[in-house]
Amino acid sequence: MRIPYGATFTASAALPVVDTHTCPHCQAATPMRVVAGAEGSATAFLWIGMKSALARAERNAEKNAASLGKSQIALARCPACNLRSAPAVTRFHLVTVAVALLILGVFGAGVVWATGLESILALALPILGGLIGALFLGGFLLGRRATLRASDAAVAIGAPEGGAAAATASAQG
């Protein structure tokens, strides 16, 4: 039985974020914009301060959207040379590898635990743990790949709509 303790509010925000993208390869400083959407939440414990919790949820959503927008601009391709920033991509992939190792470690612990059992469970748990771990890991990696591709939605201010690829294509043809 769940005992209620208050009200939780969730808000979403879609903000246009403008930031300067400085390419480490060609040193071009380009102002870029992206519309970033994110969610935020806050809880009013014992239903006290519900209006302030709603305002806090909206502020958290705006703060998360601004942070997401800045990271998407950092991961965006340079409109001049069409390359990504190596430090931003490295940070992105380090988080991916860290979470992947955590997922594999948690499900690997099930394998170590199951080897001490002497039954059919000892055979089933490592296989089941491996399958569940692979599903979690696959879903996580697909989500990270979608995040990296979403960073291409950042558009150089003054460039045609459609991202860096459209800006490069219009410059060439």
Image (cartoon, rainbow, N blue to C red):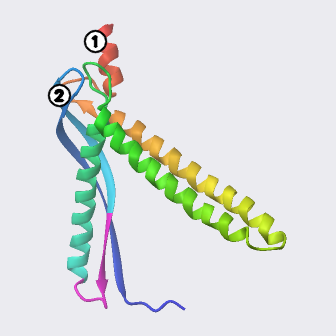
Q: Main secondary structure of the magenta part?
A: strand
Left or right of residue 38: residue 126: right
Secondary element at image label 2: strand
Label of residue 148 in the image: none
- The residue sitting at 66% across, 66% down in the picture is 112
Left or right side of 45 for 132: right
**Residue interval drawn in magenta:** 40-49
Residue under label 1: 171
Name the residue tied to disc 2: 30
Q: Is residue 2 above or below residue 107?
A: below
Contact (CB < 8 A) between labels 2 and 1? no
Please identify the quadrant where the C terminus is shown. top left
Examine the image and state in which quarter residue 126 appears.
Answer: bottom right
Q: Amino acid at mark 1?
A: Ala
Q: Which mark lies nearer to you, 2 or 1?
A: 2
Where residue 22 sits, quadrant-wise, is: top left
Q: Secondary structure at mark 1?
A: helix
Q: Residue furthest front?
A: 116
Classify 16 as above or below 133: above
Amino acid type at image mark 2: Thr
Q: Is residue 25 left or right of residue 104?
A: left
Residue at 78% across, 68% down: 122
Residue 87 screen position, x and y as percent: 29, 37
Q: Residue at x 37, y 44 (%)?
A: 92
Q: Residue at x 26, y 38 (%)?
A: 73
Please state the horizontal and vertical placement of residue 31, each as a whole percent of the image. 16, 32
Side (left or right) of 141 relative to 77? right
Residue placed furthest toward the right? 120
